[in-house]
Structures are given as C-alpha cells and as structure tokens.
Amino acid sequence: MFSRRAFRLLSPLLLSLPACASSSASTPPNSPAQAEAPPPDVPFPWEARSSTAAGIETPAAASPPVLIRNATLWLATGKTIPRGSILLRDGKIAQVAEGDISPPEGARIVDAAGKFVTPGIIDTHSHLGVYPMPGTIAHLDGNEASSPVTPDVQTVDGFWPQDPAVERAVAGGVTTLQILPGSANLIGGRAVTLKLRPALSPRQMHFPGAPDGLKMACGENPKRTYGNARHAAPGTRMGNLAMQRKAFLDAKKHEDDWQRYRTTEANRLREDQKKRAAYEAEVESRKKQQAQCHDDPYLSSCAEWQKSWEKPLEPPKPSDPGAAPARDPAKETLIGAMRGSVLVHVHCYRADDMLAMLALADEVGFRVRSFHHALEAYKIRDILVQKNVSVSTWADWWGFKMEAYDGIPENIALLQESGALPIVHTDSPEGIQRMNQEASKALASGRRAGMPLTDEEAIRWLTYNPAWALGIEKRVGTLEFGKDADVVLWDRHPFSVYASAEEVWIDGATVYQKGKKRPPWSDFELGQDTGRPTTLLPGGAP
Amino acid sequence: MTNPRSVRNTFVSSLFVLTTVLAATEAFAQPRPTPAPAPAKAAEPAAAAPLAIVGGRVHTGTGEVLEDATILLEKGLVQKIGKGLAVPAGVTTIDAKGAIVTPGFVDAFTSIGLVEVSLEDSTHDDDRGGKDPIRAAFRASDGYNPASTVVGITRAEGVTSAGVVPLGGLFSGQSAWADLDGDTRESALAQGPLALHVHLDGSLDGDRGGPAAALLLAREVFDDARTFQKNRAAWERNQSRPFAASRLDLEAIGDALAGRVPVVFHVDRASDILAAVALAKEFGLRPVIAGGAEAWKIAPRLAESKIPVIVNPLEPGPTTFDTLGTRDDNAALLHAAGVPVVITTADTHNARKLRQVAGNAVRAGLPHAAAIAAITSAPAQALGLGAKYGTLAPGKVANLVVWSGDPLEIASRPLAVVIRGKKVDLANRQSALFTRYRKLPITR
C-alpha cells in the first residue's frame, strides 16, 4: 500500500492545482491519458500525522558507543544471557552477545559484573506533568472536567515538562511513558507517549512514530465527577455507556459525512478529468487532422473536418469544489480510534464494566488495546485472552473505592498463566519510582500461590508488554539488535527490594547515573532548598 | 432523592435530631454525665494456649539476633526466649528451622478498622467531621471495626499491630493501638487513648489557613486545657472565661498535658517541625513528629530531645511546598543523627506494604537492623507501649512472625503469624476470591 499512502500524503498539494493540468503532466507520452490517470482521491484531513505531538522531537545528543560487559542480560524476549555484553551505538542496540564483544574505537566500557541489564521500563499509565509536583491548583492539567466527553483534548497540551517527578521516574529505570488524561471523563482525550529526557516541551520528548492513545473511563469516576458532584450526566453506569455510544455513533456519522464528501469530490474530479481528457483528445485529433490535411489538402474528409475545426474549442473549466464538512477534532480522534490509528486505553475496574466496554467496542467498531487498573481482570482472563486485550494494572492496590474492592495480588500472575498480556502500570508518581518492585510483588504473589512464573515472564510486564500496548514494540521493549538503546543497568537482581538503577540510557545517551551530583532537570527545583536524591550514606542492605 | 449521599445525609440528620432530643431529656433527668471511661486500658491478653516457636533466627527487635532460638509463649505473652529451651510436653510447636522470626510488624499510622472503602463515606469512622477543627475527644477506639477485611489482608503480610489514627481538623482526636486479631474492640485494642493527634501540616484544607493559624489555635487550646485542668472547680461553678474548646476536648487534652499520652504532630516543613517542638516544650508535652518530610534538615535538634519521627520512606518527592525537601534517605539521615525513627506506610489498604516500605529505607541507606526496629520496637516506644510491645522478650505481648527469608525482601513471605500468642489464620477475603477464581469457569 506504499503508493496509496504516498499519494495521500501528496494529495493536499494536488488538490490545490487544477486537476487536469497535473494529470496530463504526469502521463507518460504516447499513452492515452484516461487509461493511466490515477483515480482521484480526497484524503481524510486527519490522517497526516501519527500523533498530534509529532513534529519537533529532539533526538538525543550524539554520544560515544557504550559497551556493557559481564552483565546478566534480561532480554525480555523470554531469554536471559547469564554473562553477556551489549553494545549501544548511534542510539541503537548495535550488538547483544553471550560472552564478550570487542569494544569499538572510542567506546566507553562499563564493567557490570554481578549486575543486570534490562530494557528501559515503560509505564502505560502516567499523569506526570499533567498532575505534577508540587500539587498546586495552578497545575491541575489532567482532567478537562468541563464536559464528560472531550476526545479533542490532548495531554501533550497540558504536560509541564518541569515536573520534578520526571527525573525521579528516570532514576527508577523508566525510559518511556504514556501520559493519559485523568478518568473524570468518559472519553478524556488523547494520550501522548514520551521518552523521558529533559526538555522544554513534551513535543520535544515525543516518542517518534508512537501513535496517540485515547483515554476512556468506565465506572465510578465519571459518575462521581458529574452525577454526584454536579447533578449532571452521567449519573449512572447506564449513562456512561449511553454517552460513550452516542459519541462514537456521532463520530461515525462525521466519518460518513467525510466519506460522502470524498466520494462526491472524487466523482467531480473524475468528471473534470474526463472532460479534460475529451478536450485533449479533441485538440490532439484536430492537430492530427490538420497535419493530414496539410500533407494532403485534397483528402476527402478535410472539408468535413474543417467544419468541426470552426467549432470553438475551449479547455474545460475545473468544476467548483464541494463544501467540505467542518473539521471536528473530537470526532476525528474517535474516528482514529475506530480506524486503529489511535490506540484505545480504557480505565475500567470491574469485570462487568470491562465486558460492557468490549460489547460497546464491538457494537460501534473499535478495539480496546489495554484495560487500565482492571482489578477484576482475573475474573474474565479467558475473554481478555480471546479478545487480545492487554491489562495494565498494579501489583496490589485495592479498596480505595467500591470498584477496587475485589483486587487481589494474584491478578497479574493469573493473567500471565492464562496467556493474557499483563502490564505493570503505576498511575502514581510514587509507584513509578520503583516499578521493578511492583513487578516483583506480583511475581512473588503468583509464586506463593503455586504458579511457576519466571523472571523472564515478569520482566516483560515492564517492557515488551507495555511497548505492545503503546504500539511501539518494534522500537523498544526488548534488548535486540536494531532497537532503540533505551537500557537500564541495575546494581543487583532487579526484583530485589534493595535494587537500584545504576545507570539509565535513552537512545544510547546517559540520562541518569546513581550518585552523580548534577543540577536538577527541573527549573522549579533550581535554587530551592530541596532534597533531590543523592545517596549520602552507604546502602544498608544485608 | 436518587443521590445516595443526600439520602445518607437525611438519614444522618434525622438520627442527629433523635439523639439530641434524647440527650436533652437525659439532661433534665440526671446530673451532667461524666465522660465515658476509655475502653480497656491495657486489655488482658486472650488466654491463648501455650505455643513454642523452635529453631528460628530471631530478630528480637532491639537489634539483637539470636541463632537457632526457641520462644515459648503462654497466656498471650512471651514467656521465655533463648537457645536450647526445653519445650514442655503437649505444647504446640511451630518449626522455624531455617526461617527468620521477628516481632510482629507495627504500622503506626493507618486507618485500619476505621475505613473499609476509601471513597465510600458510609464506610468511614476516621473523621469526626463538622466545621470545628478541635476534635481532641474523638476516639478511634470508638469506631474501630475488628471485622474489617483490611485486618485479615494486612496481617497476612506480617503486620500484627496498627496505630489507628483519626484524621480531620486541627486536633483530630485520639488514636488506638490495634492488634490485628480479635472479634471485639476489647479483644483487639491494646490501649485507648494511644496518642493525641494534631495536624499542623498546612494543606489545601479549607479548615485552616496554614501552620501559622494552626499554631495559634493549637496554643490557645493547649493553654485553655491547662487552665481548665488547674481550675476545674471554677469551671464547674461557671466562673471560667470562655474556652476555645469543649469540655470533652479539654479533658482529652489533659491526658497529653499530664504526659500520659504523647502528642503526634503531623507536620512536614522543617521550620514547622521546630515550631511544633517549641510548642511541645512550652506545654510540657511528649511530642512525636509524623510526616517529617524535612526532618532530616533538623536531625541534630530532634536527636537532642530524642523526639521520634514517623516517616514514610516512599514519599515520592516535593508533592507540596511544605515537602520540597523530601528525600529518599530521610530515615537513614535521621537514624544516623540519633533520632528514633518509626517507619509507616501512612496508608490503610496498603499497610501490608510496610516491609517493602522499610526495605526501601534500607535501599536508601538505613541499616537493616534499624529498619526492623523502625517497624517493631520504635513505634511501640514512640507511642508509649514499649513495655508491652515491639520486642521479643519475656513478658511482652506475643506478636511475632515467622518468615521464609529476609522479611524486608519482596520474595519472602510469612510462614506463620502469631498475635497475642495465637497462630492466626492467613486466609482473608482476597485469598477467598483467589480460590474461587483459581480455575475458570468458576463453580459456586
């Protein structure tokens, strides 16, 4: 489909020119124009970019190659290399090997004997930057709670890149996260996927090529925000689903309007093309006739032809374009969700709420990429496997509201056992600082309950599985040749409570080094009497 | 009236009217009621059958470690502890060979038994409510629900006791010490009141205008309580000036002024901690600092007076302007300076994370033994129950846990949990859910 895609990208340009001129210009000589002209296409206007954040990504500064030696490599492919080496070069993983790799010219060599290397951790559910530290009224930018359906808002427009929590998350080995709108709204808006480096705008941090997410919410929060607090809709779960259904059906109508417009426009352009082709054929034919009559003035047809030459021959005027439907970014987001270019992430706790959402998805035509929180996912894990829906959840949170009352610490383990795609997420500036421990707890709970889970499975809850949920699994999530060099070096077994990230690389550039004194990333912390993490005392681990 | 909250408010207010009427009737019939006595001063431990824990590596909670030790429990108390003790015939034995034994862990700052579901007001008993910020007489022990599902879920992770702490207002009320077993308040609560809780931490709480206003009011109330205590007779004759707090509040504060209970000041900013310490000195209180995000900055001052600090080592960073100085190694720095450190989750449903929280303090530099002490002996001592709780020694309440490995390490798990000398069931509502959904489709 490359050609079609290329054409779509070009077509806004084509549209601005008279269709006739372009079609003949691109037609090879000696071939009849009408047979070869590409069919006129009118693109959907919202298809230009994979993410609304795309455009000014700032790549990491070039850094010399890094060779990490003698490490235990958790590849997150299901494989562990007990004593291996990994080479980071030009922002990518250049080589992963058992044993040693000979260091390239100018490489920095890190001896990691007794230490562990994993892919950078990915959090599918974060509100860093939109609910930043310190908590101030001025910086509450995560819930556009002025209406329960706001698919047009984008966290990339609310994210404060100076949030001190960003640097602290990196210190926990997190390299990528998805910034979601909050769950006050039934449809909260677009989420953005970022690489965690210091920047002046989330657009500079945007994960190149990562699709946008769409945040939706089931259950209590929208009811509480609107029904309970304001006596506005939705006030019930019934209202939740009704309003979500309506939003998608409205978006579908919008897509149909655009589809109709596209068809009308394509027909119009085709008609114009035909007229132009007829005109050109007539011009061509007269030229031929004139040439023939010039060569042989006594040709019998010439008299007849001459009469037709007297008929005026004007190039056809391009017809007037039809009126395009108004752009509607809210509906366009939902259309993206239905067409799969925007990945759907649904905050949903209860089993019945998740099944209701899956029924809605089938009814109106979208797919849920990941249920978030999903404390009752274990009750419907067979269905989640069958529907290929991933589950982003915590290790052990529960009880903070009714829909969180049935959370159990074996949720992730049961999902793993049944072949689902569990993901450790945080939704928390605290949890994000030690996601390795959260995975470790979920693993320990599963093992305690008798499930023979492996470290190799558990590391994927932090890396490959979330990468899949965010649509970036071809770029990150495992230690494999050619992937982005987003890598964490741990000072000991990553599932120990005493483990710390010793160094973190993003695109092959160091973004964190334990114990290294340096100014804070955040301008906010600059010159404040804060206690940024610098270890003053030797660790007390036994 | 479809809104459950308004239904509940109607219900509550009609109850309120009813009790007011009853109280008024009573007032005519009888002399003014005296305050109800505090429940179960130091509850008699339940008469548990003797139990022996044999062969474990025992952390006594004082920093001491005994290899291959035997612990004999009787009548809910530790009877003897040592190497090679003979186990009397017929005594039930827990084999702890190769395992680690610690005192039961204590989370000093929770709402266990007071809050069942955080966002459901109808399940809350942690906050007296109302506009009046002076709620010193409010007792957590009156609301504690020993049947809460949180109790069983928390003790399954080796937490055997919890500080059950009221919230809200400036003087939030009096906490209780709950052992996470027992089916009545009397059998679960060790002492009430445990401590008086004063919230100086300036938040976005509409009740107060920040620490300055909080200190002003706190000082006035302590002063009134002192005057009230000294001139009770004058008050009874209605010859006192008006006080800033009610009689019951002033009486409750009397326990703190007399040094019978500590006063836990919830405060984070370094300058505010010092203000709380000064206030405590002015009124002769036994201060404990809870929160203490910036306590490390003034560690020597706190060490001088041996003022305990209850910290949550997982504070994620500068979450408010009062906690700009938050740092991972707060506990380590305080300990190194000689401050008694207590570690808490400051949570309820997540109180079971206590050992992970302590493990993170170790990760940030706190010595391992100090971390164990910070969730055993230190909270007991800070809250005035050091004589009964927090260590494994003869005469102490027999709360202990047998662990599969380093108790602070995530992969370890409790093999046995003993509360008041009784091995308790580790099954709970969550394990019941797990069992039901172990195989799909479920059968019921």
Image (cartoon, helix red, strand yellow):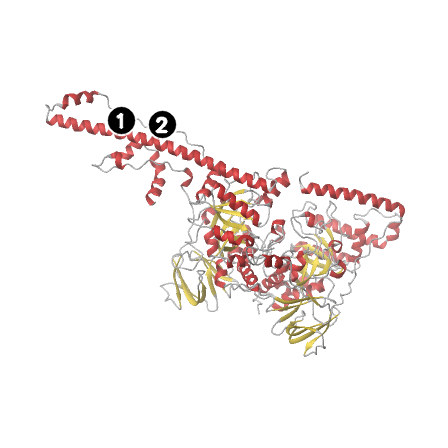
Where in the figure is residue A351, as x and y percent of width and height?
Answer: 56, 50
Residue A199 visible in the shown view: no
Do marks 1 and 2 both belong to one polypeptide chain?
Answer: yes
Q: Which image quarter holds the C terminus of chain B?
A: bottom right
Image quadrant of residue B378?
bottom right
Q: Amino acid at mark 2?
A: Asp
Instruction: Tell me: A267 left or right of A379.
Output: left
A435 or B286, which lies in front? A435
Q: Residue sitting at 69 percent across and 78 percent down?
A: B85
The local secondary structure at tag 1 comes to loop
**Are discs 1 and 2 less than 8 Å apart at CB?**
no
A145 versus B76 height, above or below: above
Mark identifier at residue A320: 2
Residue at mark 1: chain: A
A262 or A101, which lies in front? A262
Which residue corresponds to mark 1? Answer: A315
Q: CA distance from mark 1 to mark 2?
A: 15 Å
Where in the figure is residue A127, as x and y percent of width and height?
Answer: 54, 49
Seen as rendered, the residue at the extreme front is B443
B326 versus A235 height, above or below: below
Where in the figure is residue A437, as x and y percent of width and height?
Answer: 55, 60
Crowd class of label 1 (few under 14; some 14 to 19; many from 20; radius 10 Å) = some
A195 versus B335 height, above or below: above
Image quadrant of residue B346?
bottom right
Residue at mark 2: chain: A
Q: Amino acid at mark 1?
A: Pro
